[in-house]
Amino acid sequence: MSGVPAYVTCAFVEEPENHPETSSRHRELLSEPFDDHPDGKLYSPGYFDDVEDREEYKPGGFHPVHPGDNLGRDNRFRVIHKLGNGALSTVWLCRDYEKSKYVALKIIIADAPRDVCSELKVVHRKDLDLDQAGGKHIALPLDHFWIDGPSGSHLCQVLPVSGPRVPVIWRTFPDPSKPAINISLQVTSGLQFLHRNGIRHGGLSDLDGLREEQVAMELGEPRKEGLLTELDETPGPSAPKYIVQPINLEALDPRHLIDLACIIDFGESYDSSSPPEGLGIPPGCCSPELIFDSLVGIASDIWALACTIYELRSMSRLCETWDGDDDEVILQIVRLLGKLPEPWWPFWDARDRWCKEDGTPIVDPDIGIAFATPFTVDELIALGVHFRIGSATGPWVP
């Protein structure tokens, strides 16, 4: 299978907001108005802004979950806390009573397609040996099952518990450049493992020695927020009693983290023998082949790996875009690498806004500065690290 480096983590992270696996019926549900509610909204807005879309607690949407719930056959999994959420799932820290360990339970919306789960396709590869070099850096589902609930039938993936995303723990290092080298090597090893096995991808937390009450003390009690309809009515059966805010993994004691980086989220992975027509990945990680020719393959993987390594080293993204505009990404590539090679250069329609035909930047006559000032990688890394560490406003974006 093939794709791009997913998320690199000593962490479990939310999935991309715009996931290509969203089914046509789910898109219809998102666009259908709710005539009986003001502004087409089911629920009143809350104060938590780092939680799942409340409007997706409806038939076809999220499964309502609360800390203390027991899920799975014979109530095997007890919900302890929320780890995260995304457009198509919520993720919960659970105690697996059968294995006597903690796991991450990813519960996918009911309306998601059942036959396109890339993670399970990878897991079902009988020739996949995770004991090979690099295999330990791949976080794949350990098990899966289905839940029938008020919103429908939900696929649940049992995953290893991971720690915070790498950028989250960066501030704990006095010199992030040193661990960045080690993490980059681990990520590259993991991607090499995937490629050896025909898969293109388009430190784990150590809590098992703690009792549930100790875990609660380490992570803090779940923060809850009531859920009401726009008409101040009691929500229907598809809604939970309250919304739970995800764990603040930044506050996790470092002694519970293992020095192991993992690649997670294989929603964009695919078999190298049958690449898709496109990938639902952030524009800033797209290779020129993907932007101009919609070509998916090893080139797009290597490009995305390079973007990941750059972000690990500089703590800022190599190419950033606020509205998904390909021209913004292409401009940043040109600023870094110079004029695009043929045949891409003449097909970049926006080139004359910033560059001459030979690729040199156009100078603003009013201020005497180029519209697209070139940068070297070393300059970008220095600026990214400086502004990330020295400014409370976050990373500098070229």
Image (cartoon, grey):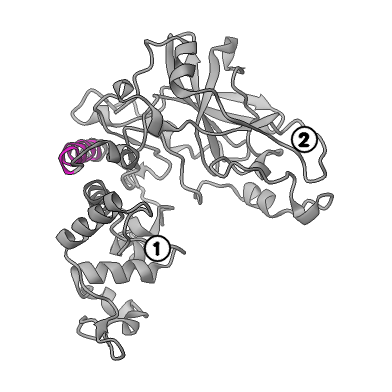
The tag on residue 225 is none
Answer few, some or many: residues within 10 Å of disc 1's Cα (few below 14, many 20 plus, some between 14 and 19). some
Residue type pointed to by label 1: Thr
Answer few, some or many: residues within 10 Å of disc 2's Cα (few below 14, many 20 plus, some between 14 and 19). some
Q: What secondary structure characterizes most of the magenta part?
A: helix
Residue 140: give x, y in percent of width and height. 37, 29
Give the quadrant of the N terminus.
top left
Circles 2, 1 touching at the beta carbon (< 8 Å): no
Residue 366: give x, y in percent of width and height. 31, 90
Q: Which residue is mark 2?
A: 235
Helix, strand or loop for disc 2: loop
Give the quadrant of the C terminus.
bottom left
Magenta span: 177-191
Q: Which residue is mark 1?
A: 321
Q: Earlier in the sequence, mark 2 or mark 1?
A: 2
Going 72% across and 29% down the picture, which residue do you hit? Answer: 150
Q: Is 349 displayed left or right of 245 in the figure?
A: left
Quadrant in the picture for residue 232 = top right
Asked if one can make out residue 299 in the rendered structure from this viewpoint, the answer is no
Q: Nearer the viewer, residue 346 or 205?
A: 205
Residue 171: give x, y in percent of width and height. 29, 40
Helix, strand or loop for disc 1: loop
Residue 235: give x, y in percent of width and height. 77, 35
Q: Is residue 387 above or below residue 63?
A: below
Quadrant in the picture for residue 194 = top left
Residue type pointed to by label 2: Pro
